Image (tube, helix red, strand yellow):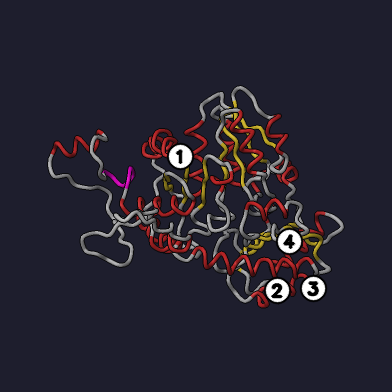
Amino acid sequence: MSEKRDDGGSTDPAPGFDTLAVRSGVERTHYLEHSDPIFLTSSFVFDNAAQAAARFAGDEPGFVYSRAGNPTVTAFQNRLAMLEGAEACVATASGMSAIMATVMSLTASGSRVVAARELFGATLQMFKILERFGVSVDYVKVTEPQQWRAALRPETRLFYLESPSNPLTEIADLGAISGIARAAGLPLVVDNCLCSPALQRPLALGADIVVHSATKYLDGQGRVLGGAVLGSRAFIEETLVPFVRTTGPTLSAFNAWVLLKGMETLGLRMERQCANALELARWLEAHPAVERVLYPGLTSHPQHRLAMSQQSAGGAVIAFEVRGADDETRRRRAWQVIDNCRLLSITANLGDVKTTITHPASTTHSRAGSEARLAAGIGEGLLRIAVGVENVTDLSADLARGLAAG
């Protein structure tokens, strides 16, 4: 869906976000179905040998094999591109495969990456694996643009960050960091998982490439895995598509269809989840057993003003630390909060309509190592809550049991 002009010269207004989330990206078949169709097929047939040859050569548009393209996956890609304001999108099997494909398509042995220290645990692990293949990583603080400039080397090929970061919700100044990257002729890659395009559009703020774990808010109900990479048509078609098509981290048609359905309610869900998160964060901030609360929507958040200039709301992820005299006490009390929850789901996933709680130091960031956790500020007393759509009074009552038991 895009702006249209009729014969009289009048211009129709561009559709709003929620309209695009429901109606964009899908072309009806000749059956004129109302719901999005799903194409569960591994391959596609041709009218004749000449057409098969033309499609394999790329001389004629059309689908060949679902590893290289599928109508349902294409519909997901088109819809997400509309929501992010991107020229093009490639879907992948998971968020991690989206990150891997992006970084590997832009680097080779001897390349360097400047990345934020404050990254999801699996992303840190992935960068460690890439170091075995000659790709080095220089880690800097996500909130300090001058560190990004200082880390530049002739071998640097890209900047990589999350904003907000997972789990500490630290905010990057996307305008400042993108300016540094642009001056050096490098792409800035932003993981937009915690906000989704409902709250933030990094491309409009200066980023060159956006990656998603579609598993999270795009689906919204914890059903399937998926990932996506968005950017300019030139980057997607000339650099990323050949890599993904050949290496095969392909999104399944079924998962793409589920994600299409999830995106239809993205704006509605995020509005409710952000409102719940703000109320719950305020409640936690006033609780005597809580040392501190990190939530971008709170005025106490170190980057609150920056967050509100880049995001339309504070998001649905809250990090908070329980009080304790030492690491052993803090971990015991953090686990006590978790173990006393009867409503919150004890799982490391986020983005679900069901509220989840996890202890990052022993789950999502456990394999990152103590040094990396310390550098990222992830202590033993830290808990992460991904707030859902339940009644917020029920959520606070659930947490109160564990907090009071310490």
Q: Nearer the viewer, mark 4 or mark 2?
A: 4
Corner quadrant of residue 245: top left
Secondary structure found at label 1: loop
- Determine whether the residue tagged by mark 3 lies in a helix, strand or loop: helix
> Callout 3, which amino acid?
Ala
Residue 92 is left or right of residue 372, and the answer is left
Residue 232 is tagged as 1
Q: CA distance from mark 2 to mark 3?
A: 12 Å
Q: Secondary structure at mark 4?
A: loop
Mark 3–mark 1 Cα distance, whole angstroms, equals 51 Å
For disc 2, the marked residue is 396
The foreground one among 156 and 335 is 156
Name the residue that disc number 4 marks: 298
The tag earlier along the polypeptide, 4 or 2, is 4
Q: Nearer the viewer, mark 2 or mark 3?
A: 2
Residue at numbered disc 3: 404
- Disc 4 residue crowd, few under 14, some 14–19, many 20+, Cα 10 Å: some
Camera-nearest label, 1 or 2: 1
Mark 4–mark 3 Cα distance, whole angstroms, equals 23 Å
Of mark 4 and mark 1, the one earlier in the sequence is 1
Q: Hey, what amino acid is under mark 1?
A: Ser
Looking at the rendering, which quadrant does residue 299 occupy?
Answer: bottom right
Q: CA distance from mark 1 to mark 2?
A: 43 Å
Q: What type is the residue that disc 4 sits on?
A: Leu
| Mark 2 vs 3, N-terminal side | 2
Q: Secondary structure at mark 2?
A: helix
Residue 384 in the figure: left or right of residue 292: left
State which region is magenta: 64-69
Give the number of the mark in front: 4 or 3. 4
Q: Residue furthest front?
A: 8
